[in-house]
Amino acid sequence: METDKFSSADSAAEIRIGAPERNWPQRSWRSRGYDVAERLVGGAWFLLLAIVLAHVLMDTIRTIDVDDPGAIDWPKLVSRACVLLFYATLSWLIFIRPRPIQRKRGIFPTVLAFVSTYVVWLLPLLPPAQPNPPLQTVSASLLLVGSLAMIYVIVHLGRSFSIVPQARKLVTSGPYAVVRHPLYLAEEIAILGAALQYAWWASVPFLVVHTTLQIRRMYYEEDLLRSSFPDYADYARHRSRVIPGVW
C-alpha cells in the first residue's frame, strides 16, 4: 500500500507449497530493457521520496522544543519517521527484485494500483481536526502499529514486492499464513491513524473510497496469482482475505 503516503501492492511471494515448474517464454531484449528501466525508475523514485522525507524529518526534529515536550506534534513525527523507513525499504527491494514471471494484462489494473497508492497524498489537503490529545494518542498509536506492520510484511515479502499486479513467487508463510493480504491490512491501519488527524466528515468518505480501491486491487492480484500458481487456489480456500475468520 501504504504510502502521509502509504502504499504498496500485496502481490504474494515465495513458492513453498510445491507449484510445478513452468517453461516461461524467453523474453525479448525490449522486454528485458523495460524490466530494467522499471526497476531503476521505481527504486530511484522511492529513494528520492526517502531522501525528501529525511530532510523534512530533520527539519522537524530541529524545531522541537526540548523544554516543552507536550507541544511536540507526535503523530506527525511518528508518521514521517515510519514512512521514511518504509520508502527506503521499498527502494531497496525494487532495485534487487527479479523480473516477474507474469503481469496482469490491461491498463486499468496498473492505473488502479497507482491511484490507490498515491491518493493518500491528498490527505494533507483535508481540513484538520480540532486539537484532541486523546485522539492524537490513538492516531500516533495506529500510525506506529500500522507502519511497523507494513515494514515487517514488506521485508517478509522481500523481492516479490510490487505496486502493480505482478507474479514472481508465492509466499504462504509468516503474515501470509494468517491472511492473504496482510500488507493491505497494515496499510489501512496506518491510513486510519493518519485520517484521525483530519475532520471526520472529510476523512470518512476518503477512507471509504480508498478501501474500495484497495479491495478491487486485491481481486486483480488474486486473479493473477490464481492463474500463475496452481497451488494458490488451495491456499486461498484456507486463508481469509484480510480479517482472520471474518473476510
Image: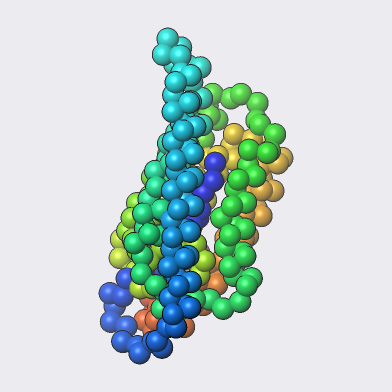
Frontmost residue, 152 versus 111: 111
Q: Is residue 242 left or right of residue 153?
A: right
* Count of numbered circles in the view: 0
Q: Position of residue 154 (x, y in %)?
A: 38, 56
Q: Position of residue 127 (x, y in %)?
A: 70, 34
Q: Is residue 19 left or right of residue 94?
A: left
Please identify the residue farthest to the top as the structure is shown.
67
Residue 164 shows in this picture: yes
Frontmost residue, 63 versus 171: 63
Q: Residue at x 58, y 68 (%)?
A: 110
Frontmost residue, 57 versus 31: 31
Q: Position of residue 114 (x, y in %)?
A: 58, 60
Q: Quadrant of residue 51?
A: top left
Q: Residue at x 44, y 24 (%)?
A: 61
As drawn, 184 above or below 55: below
Q: Residue at x 44, y 80 (%)?
A: 29
Q: Position of residue 11 (x, y in %)?
A: 44, 67
Residue 187 shows in this picture: no
What colour scheme was applied to this rendering of the protein?
A: rainbow
Q: Residue at x 48, y 65 (%)?
A: 38
As drawn, 123 above or below 180: above
Q: Quadrant of residue 196?
A: top right
As drawn, 10 above or below 237: above
